[in-house]
Image (cartoon, rainbow, N blue to C red):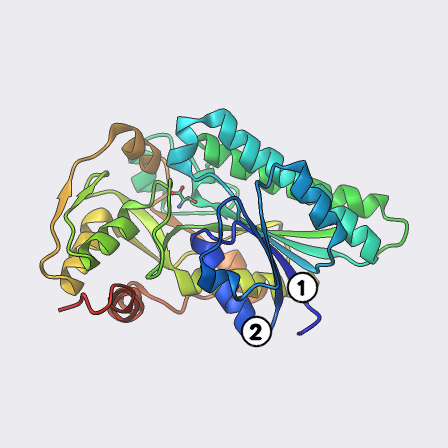
Amino acid sequence: MASHIVLLTGASGEIGQSLVEALSERGVAIIATDIRPLPPSVARRCTEVLQGSITDPALHEVLEQRRFHQVFHLAAILSSQAERNPEEAHHVNVEGTLRLLQTAHRVAKRQGEPITFLFPSSIAVYGLPNLEAKRRAGRVREEEYLTPMTIYGANKLYCELLGLYYARFYRRLASEPEAGWLDFRALRFPGLLSALTVPTGGTSDYAPEMLHAAAQGKPYRCFVRPDTRIPFMAMPDAIRALLLLAEAPQASVQRHVYNVTSFSATAEEIAAETRQLFPSAQITFEPDPLRQAIVDTWPEEIDDTAAQHDWGWFPEYSRERTFREYLALNISRRYQGALP
Ligand code: SER
C-alpha cells in the first residue's frame, strides 16, 4: 500500500479528520488540503498539507504537479451555512468540484491510469414536498424525490451528475481505453454522528451538537421539533462505507451514486439516548423555522439495498451500538471523563 497516494480535500472537516486517521493506519500516503489549518494530530498523519480554497487556481496548479491514485473530495459548505450565502455555496460546492474533476483528470492523463474519485453526497439531494409525503414515503430510493429545497442539496445533486458526465466524457476522449479517465463514485450519507468532532453549518447538526453539549455539561436548545425524523450513521460506518466503495472492483459498481444508512431516529429519541449517557443533560426544543423546513423535506429513511447488493455494504453500528458503545466510550474520552 506504500505507493498508494490519496488526495483528500476538506481534511480538517468532520469526515476528513476521521478519514485521515483511517487511511494513515492503512499505510496510505495522504496529500491533504483544507481552507483551514489542520489540527496538528491530523497534519502529522499526512505526507503533505496544502492550505487553500478548493476554488483557488494556485492550489490546483500545485495539485496538478502531484501524483495520486484516489481522490476523496470532502470540502464543501454544508446545508444551513449554504442557505446564508447561496452564491458562495455554489462557488465552493460546484465550481470547486468542477475544478477538482479537471485537475484529477489531468493528473490521471499524465500518469496514464484512471483515478478513483470519491464524492460524498447527502440526503439533502432529496426533497419531499410536505410532511405527509415524508411520513408516507418509507425508504426512499436513489432515483426518487430528487427535488432538493436547499442550494446545498441542489449543488450535491448536480455534482453527482457532473462527476458522472466527466467520467464518461474523459473516457471517450482517452486515446487508449484505460488511459487518463476518472472512475467517479458517489455516496449519499445520512446525518453523521462523530464522537470526536462537531460539524459546522449542517442541518442534521442538532444530533451531534446535543450529544457534545451534554458531554460537556452544557445546556442545549435543539433547533428542530422533537418528532423530526431522519436517518443517521456513526462516523466509523461512514468511513467504512467510503473505503468499501473506493475499493470495490469496478465491475461491481453498477451506478454512479449509492445511498448508505444505518438507523433512523427522531430528535426526541436522540435526546433520550443522550440522557441515558448523560443523565444531567439539559435539552430543550426551540425549532428554527428555516432549519426545520429543511429537515422536513429530507426522508425519514433511505433505501441502501443497491449498496448492499453491489459492494457488500452493511452498517456495523446499530442505534444501540452507536450510543452505548461508540459514543459512550469515545465522547467520554474526548471530554476527559465527563461521563458519570
Ligand atoms: N449533514 C449535512 C447537513 O446537514 C448534510 O449532508 O448539511
Considering every residue shown, the one lying at the far left of the view is: 280
Please tell me in which quarter of the rendered image ligand 1 is found: top left
- On the image, the x and y values in percent for residue 295 come to 33, 38
Horizontal arrangement in the rendering, residue 214 relative to residue 144 (left or right): left
249 and 89: which is toward the camera: 89
In the image, residue 325 sits, relative to residue 87, either above or below, namely: below
Tell me the residue at 47%/36% (across/down): 153
Tell me the residue at 28%/69% (across/down): 333
Residue under label 2, please give it: 26
**Kind of residue at disc 2:** Arg
Determine the secondary structure under disc 1.
Answer: strand
Q: Quadrant of the C terminus?
A: bottom left
Cβ of mark 1 under 8 A from ligand 1: no
Residue under label 1, please give it: 5
Q: Is residue 260 visible?
A: no
- On the image, the x and y values in percent for residue 55 come to 61, 36
Check residue 205 in the rendering and tell me which mark sits there, or answer none.
none
Tell me the residue at 53%/73% (across/down): 25
> In terms of sequence position, does the residue under pointer 1 or pointer 2 come before the other?
1
Rounded to the nearest angstrom, the CA distance separating label 1 from label 2 is 11 Å
